[in-house]
Image (cartoon, rainbow, N blue to C red):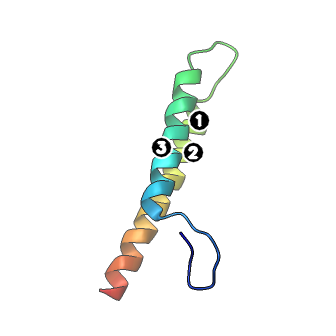
Amino acid sequence: MTADDGQPYLPCEAVLVLLRAIATSCRNLADDPDCDLHTAGAAIDIEADTLEFRAIAATQETA
């Protein structure tokens, strides 16, 4: 999809799905004794939650 200025963008929902998939992958890899990705997964979830909150807030402001 493209914005009014022609720049490509991902809908918020797609970004959330992507970030959560990355977080899940990090957690799956965290069982590897050579990896400690629990912290990385938590950080990605925080970013997804923040993005979701901002999207909801922006939607409510225009409604």
Secondary structure under tag 3 reads helix
Q: Quadrant of residue 30 in the image?
A: top right
Horizontal and vertical percent for residue 7?
A: 65, 75
Between the C-alphas of marks 3 and 1, the distance is 14 Å
Q: Which residue: 42% across, 70% down?
A: 55
58 to the left or right of 42:
left
User: Mark 2, mark 3: which one is toward the viewer?
Assistant: 3
Q: Do residues under tags 2 and 1 come within 8 Å of each other at their CB atoms?
A: yes
Circles 2 and 3, Cβ within 8 Å, touching? The answer is no
Mark 3 or mark 1, earlier in chain: 3
The residue that label 2 is drawn on is 43
> Height in image: 25 above or below 32?
below
Circle 3 packing at 10 Å, graded few (<14), some (14-19), many (20+), is: many
- Secondary-structure class at tag 2: helix
Q: Which residue is mark 3?
A: 20
* Image position of 51 with respect to 29: above or below: below
Which amino acid, by three-letter code, is at mark 2? Ala
Residue visible at 70% across and 15% down?
34
Give the residue at x 62% y 14%.
32
Residue type at mark 3?
Arg
Distance between the alpha carbons at the discs numbered 2 and 1: 6 Å
Q: Which mark is residue 22?
A: none
Camera-nearest residue between 11 and 23: 11
